[in-house]
Every structure is written in C-alpha cells, then in structure tokens.
Amino acid sequence: MLNYRVLAIIKRELREKLFSKAFIILTLMIPGLIIVFGGVQALLYSTESKGLKFDLVVEDSGLLGDFQNEFSQRDFVTKKHYVFNYMSMTREDFKTHLQNKRQQIVDEKLSGIIFIPLSALKDKKIEYYAKTPQNISLSRELERPINKIFLNNFFKSKSLSAEDLDFARSGVDFTGFKVTKDEKIAQEGYGNIVLAYALSFLLYISLLMIGQMAMQSVIEEKGSKIVEVILSSVSAKELMTGKILGSAITGVAQMAVWLGTILAVSSSALIALPPEVTLNIKPDLVIYVLLNFFIGLVLFVGLFSMMGAIFDNAQDAASGNMPIMMLIIIPFFIAISMMENPNKPYIEIASLFPFASIIVMPARLALIEVPVWQQALAVIINLLTIYALFPIAGKIYRIGILRTGKKPKWSEVIKWLKYKY
C-alpha cells in the first residue's frame, strides 16, 4: 500500500539514515577496513619472526653439510635473515653445550637450539630448546627442509636419482576446472571462495546492523512520544510500511556500494591478481544478491521493528530479539561451512529455507551453478514468509507502539493478536 503518506515516511527514513554523515562514513569505512585489515595481516605475516639466531646441532656429522647446503637455499635465511650456527657433537657433549648456552637463551640473545639426534633418521623426532619452544610458524618452516634431508639420507642406498627424490617428496596438486552449461570449460581458482566469504560476511553484518538500527529507531520514537504525533497523520500500518521500505532501501544502497568496491578492486588494472585468485563475478549474481537482500531486509527489519514496538528500551528488547538474531547467525555459519564442500545436502536445503536462503543462496551462487528454478523458489519462499508473518507483526506493532510502562509478558503479546482493529 504505497500512497503519499507512506512515501513521506520513506523520505523521512532516507533523510535520517541514508543521507546521515554517520551512515555514509560507515558505508565507506567497511571496504576501507577490509583493505586495511588485509594489509595489516599481510604486514604481520611478513614481519613475523625475523632475525632469529639458532644453534643447529647434528649428532651425525655426515649430515652437517646437508643441512648447511639445504638451509642456505631457503627463503627464511635470505628474506627473514635467520642465522644458523652449525655444529656436530655427541649427545653428552650437547648436554654440556646446552648448559653453557642456557643464559643466552633466557636473555634472548640466542633464539634456540635445534638438536638432530641419530634416532631422528628413523623416527624423525628432533628436539628444540628455547625460551618459547611452542613456535608453530617456526616448526612449519623448518619441517620441509629437514624432512627433505631425512628422505635423501633414507633413499641414498636405494639408487634413486635426484629427480626421483623430488617426485617422491612432491604432493598432489589439484587444479579445478569449472564445467557449465553455457560457457567453455575454464580453470577455477580460489577467487570465488573469497567472494563467497565476502558475500556471507557482508550480508551477515548488514542484516544485523540495519535490523538493530530499525529497532533502536522505533524504541527512541516510542520513548520520546514522537510516534504519537506521527500517528496523528498516518496509520500505524503506513508508518511501519514506510520505515521498513526506507530501511530496506538504505541497506540495499549500502550493499551496492560494497559490491561495487569489490568489483572495482577485482577488475582494476592497477591490481594484477594471479589466476588462482581471480574473481568471477557475473552481473546476474550482483542483481540477484541485491534483490534477495532487499527481500531479506524487508523481512528482518519488520521483525526487528516489531520487537522495538513491544519494548521500551534496548535492554529489554535484547532478550526478545535473540531468536531473530539466530535466524541470521545460523545461516551465516552454514554459509561458511559451505566453503569446504558446497554440494552437501543440507546446503541445498538451507539455500531454499526461509530466512536462511538470504545468506546461503548468494554464497552458493558464488561457488557453483544453481538452477534458475531454485533461485526463483528461494525468492518466492521468502515472499510467502513475508506475506504470512507481516499481518502478525503488523498487529503487534500497532498495539505495542502506543503502550509504555511495564515490560509486557509474552503471554500478553500473544493476547494482542486476538484484538480486532
């Protein structure tokens, strides 16, 4: 029911939210924060554990040259400036050496001592002595070159060539090729997994943020009695419709900015993404995400507005809106679990289920080819959900918006549905 009164409410909502400085700053800040956090994370990884000094002690003197040659070729020596002091000694001599170096380790003048016993050639168990021995990144970096030396020593008597050893050490590398009905077979990298993560996260954040903003707006208007003045000119149904559509338009505009930023970054000539992380974003995916998101906002903003009308303050409303928040949180985790295998049966069910499809279906579309009928069915199911729930939400809103004072019990809220207006 769109009339000039509803349009006036929509304009008011857009003026207060869409064109507010806080909303504009937040909308522009999210893509910036994603870039900044990504850069900070890359910086942290690039600067982690640089300039460490180690004693590398080998019990078998025959392996000393192998360690020197292998470690000198590694990036952690040239790029991270790791310094290794190589030596060979027996277990008893090593105990003395460890005692002599104890104070240097405590004072962090020496990062640690790596001891390669003779038994390591059979069980691959090495010893690391340090002030902080549980260093996962260090063990991950050292594992491969040390294992290579062990393998070379193990197969030395097997008459295998260097090429045979390299093949034995190498793992299996899967290269995925996407097969679709309309397009050529093309190599598929990890880019669309990143896209699915981004869509899931942005939809999750925006649904919660816009919903909470709508609920807070209703609570503030109810508490300040402004709503009584507004209801003297428009009906409660028109007010609720205008607020829902205004919030939904605001959210879609925000999502369009975020998706536009992703498109701009992925297609920018200034950022040459490697083939394995190239994003494959189709226009129909963007259109579907925005349409699906608009419907989802109408659904969730209506429910959050209903909660705002029931309660007089945000603290009381927090207990009531938890079930609504779970309808956003659970689909988000389902969408994240999809990254491992998007063909799980429950994924397809969730992508068609009301509420859940708002987050799960866009993430699924980013990963696999989804039949058009399933995309349409998800939209239809959410529209039917709106049609079924909104008469109930509207009646609760009309009664609750004018009631203040004592916090109502849920049994009282249920009785509101029996009132005739």
Image (tube, grey):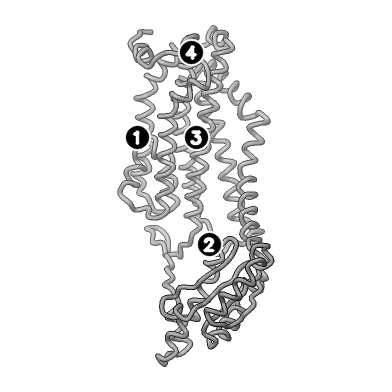
Q: Amino acid at mark 1?
A: Ile
Q: CA distance from mark 1 to mark 3?
A: 18 Å
Q: Nearer the viewer, residue 48 or 335?
A: 48
Tag 2 residue: 136
Q: Report helix, strand or loop for mark 3.
A: helix
Tag 1 residue: 381
Q: Nearer the viewer, residue 239 or 45?
A: 45
Of discs 1 and 3, which sits in the foreground? 3
The answer to which of marks 3 and 4 sits earlier in the sequence is 3
Tag 4 residue: 401
Tag 3 residue: 207
Measured from the top left, where is residue 312 in percent x and y? 51, 15
The answer to which of marks 1 and 3 sits earlier in the sequence is 3
Measured from the top left, where is residue 40 in percent x and y? 64, 53
For residue 419, side relative to residue 300 (left or right)? left
Q: Nearer the viewer, residue 66 or 344?
A: 66
Of discs 2 and 3, which sits in the foreground? 2
Q: Quadrant of the C terminus?
A: top left
Dots 1, 4 in contact, CB < 8 A: no
Q: Quadrant of the N terminus?
A: top left
Dots 2, 1 in contact, CB < 8 A: no
For residue 70, side relative to residue 341 (left or right)? right
Q: Report helix, strand or loop for mark 4.
A: loop
The answer to which of marks 1 and 4 sits earlier in the sequence is 1
Q: CA distance from mark 1 to mark 4?
A: 29 Å
Q: In the picture shown, does residue 352 fall above or below 338?
A: above
